[in-house]
Image (cartoon, rainbow, N blue to C red):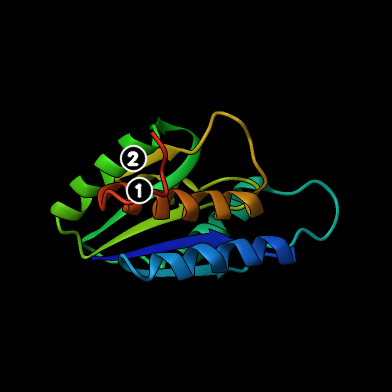
Amino acid sequence: MKTTLVAVGKTNDAWIKQGILVYMDRLKHYLKFEYHELEDVKIKSGKPDFARVSFTEGEKILKFIEPGDHVVLFDENGKEFTSEGFADWFVKRQNASPRQLIFLIGGAYGFSPEVRSRANEIISLSQMTFSHQMVRVFAIEQIYRAQSIIKGEPYHHR
């Protein structure tokens, strides 16, 4: 099963790019993993039309999704897990054998209703709000941590 993380917006900070690369390199030992950044909608001036922005970004996201994919939104209002619980969840998804497991990080104005309706699940990394840049590193690190827990490796201390 391929696992993909799709994020809206480009990563600007070098230290965040480096964190993404570190965990992507670690993940290649466990699973086929891809990371994609989609261009966000640029707001020119004035009050943004949130619905239009999220709809346009949603159209770009939906191009990555095919029938048979299991789609998971990262959203602060989603289901929360411990790292061990997330690892258990991951094993169940792998055993269900979807074509692809796709995690999504939306843009600054959230997900469109069309993307939300396509999602199979919504997961929260925290009830706190993080920048869309930092969430990328957190998400990839948690995917890596789940794999190390599944394999019984010492990365996760419990």
The amino acid beneath tag 1 is: Ala
SS at mark 2? Answer: helix
Which residue, given by chain and number where applicable, does mark 2 sit on? Answer: 86
Which residue, given by chain and number where applicable, does mark 1 sit on? Answer: 146
Labels 1 and 2 touching (C-beta < 8 A)? yes
Circle 1: is it few (<14), some (14-19), or many (20+) Cα within 10 Å?
many
Residue 54: x %, y % from top left: 58, 52
Which of the image's four quarters has the C terminus?
top left
Farthest residue to the right: give it.
45
Residue 32: x %, y % from top left: 32, 71
The amino acid beneath tag 2 is: Phe
SS at mark 1? Answer: helix
- Relative side of 72 to 94, left or right: right
Is residue 2 shown above or below 125? below
Q: CA distance from mark 1 to mark 2?
A: 6 Å
Residue 101: x %, y % from top left: 30, 58
